[in-house]
Image (cartoon, helix red, strand yellow):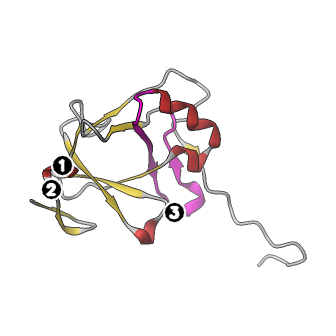
C-alpha cells in the first residue's frame, strides 16, 4: 500500500504497520489511521503520519528522553509504548512537548490512543531543550 506525505513523499507500507486511533488525536479527531515513520536524521524524534492527510506530520518522542520521571506511564497497557507530541519551534529552545496528553501505542492490537492525564504537575507546553551555555573561559558574542 502507499500514501503520500508532504515531508516524506511516497511512503510504502503494509497494513500491519498501521495504527488505528478510534478517537483520532486532539485537534485531528477526523484522522484515524497513522504510521510511525523513523528518520535517522531527526533522532530522537519519530513522526506520526496520518495516512489520509498528506499535509500533517507530528513529531513524537519517548517521554523518558525529556524527563526520567515519566517512566511510570508504562502502567497504561502492558507492552504499550508511550510517546509525547512535540511542537518544534524557532529558536529550537522554544520547542515544547505535551506531557499531559501522551499517546499510547499497543503494538499487538495496532491501536493508538491519546490520553489526557489528570495531573497538574505535567505541563502541556514543557520546554525540553536547554539554551546553549557559554563554555567556561570563553566570551559570548
Q: Which residue is depicted at the point 40% across and 36% down?
A: 79
Residue 19: x, y in percent? 24, 43
- Any magenta on residue 50? no
Q: Tell me which numbered mark, 2 or 3, is placed earlier along the sequence.
A: 2
Mark 1: secondary structure: helix
Residue 106 appears left or right of 33: right
Residue 47: x, y in percent? 35, 56
Extreme right residue here? 137
Residues rendered magenta in the picture: 76-99
Quarter occupied by residue 110: top left
10 Å crowding of disc 1: few (<14), some (14-19), many (20+): few
10 Å crowding of disc 3: few (<14), some (14-19), many (20+): few
List the residue tagged with mark 2: 14
Mark 2: secondary structure: loop
List the residue tagged with mark 1: 16
Residue 16: x, y in percent? 18, 49
Q: Which residue is depicted at the point 39% across and 57% down?
A: 46
As measured in the structure, the alpha-carbon distance from the residue carrying label 2 to the one carrying label 3 is: 35 Å
Quadrant containing the C terminus is: bottom right
As measured in the structure, the alpha-carbon distance from the residue carrying label 1 to the one carrying label 3 is: 36 Å
Residue 72 vertical position relative to residue 18 in the rendered view, above or below: above
As measured in the structure, the alpha-carbon distance from the residue carrying label 2 to the one carrying label 1 is: 5 Å
List the residue tagged with mark 3: 90
Amino acid at each position: 500500500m502507499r500514501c503520500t506525505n508532504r515531508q516524506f513523499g511516497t511512503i510504502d507500507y503494509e497494513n500491519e504497520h498501521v495504527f488505528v486511533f478510534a478517537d483520532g488525536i486532539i485537534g485531528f479527531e477526523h484522522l484515524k489511521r497513522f504510521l510511525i515513520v523513523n528518520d535517522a536524521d531527526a533522532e530522537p524524534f519519530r513522526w506520526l503520519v496520518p495516512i489520509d492527510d498528506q499535509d500533517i506530520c507530528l513529531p513524537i518522542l519517548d517521554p523518558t528522553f525529556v524527563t526520567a520521571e515519566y517512566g511510570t506511564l508504562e502502567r497504561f497497557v502492558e507492552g504499550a509504548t508511550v510517546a509525547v507530541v512535540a511542537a518544534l519551534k524557532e529558536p529550537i529552545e522554544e520547542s515544547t512537548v505535551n506531557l499531559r496528553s501522551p499517546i499510547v501505542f499497543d503494538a499487538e492490537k495496532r491501536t493508538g490512543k491519546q490520553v489526557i492525564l489528570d495531573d497538574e504537575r505535567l505541563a502541556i507546553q514543557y520546554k525540553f531543550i536547554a539554551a546553549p551555555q557559554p563554555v567556561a573561559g570563553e566570551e559570548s558574542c
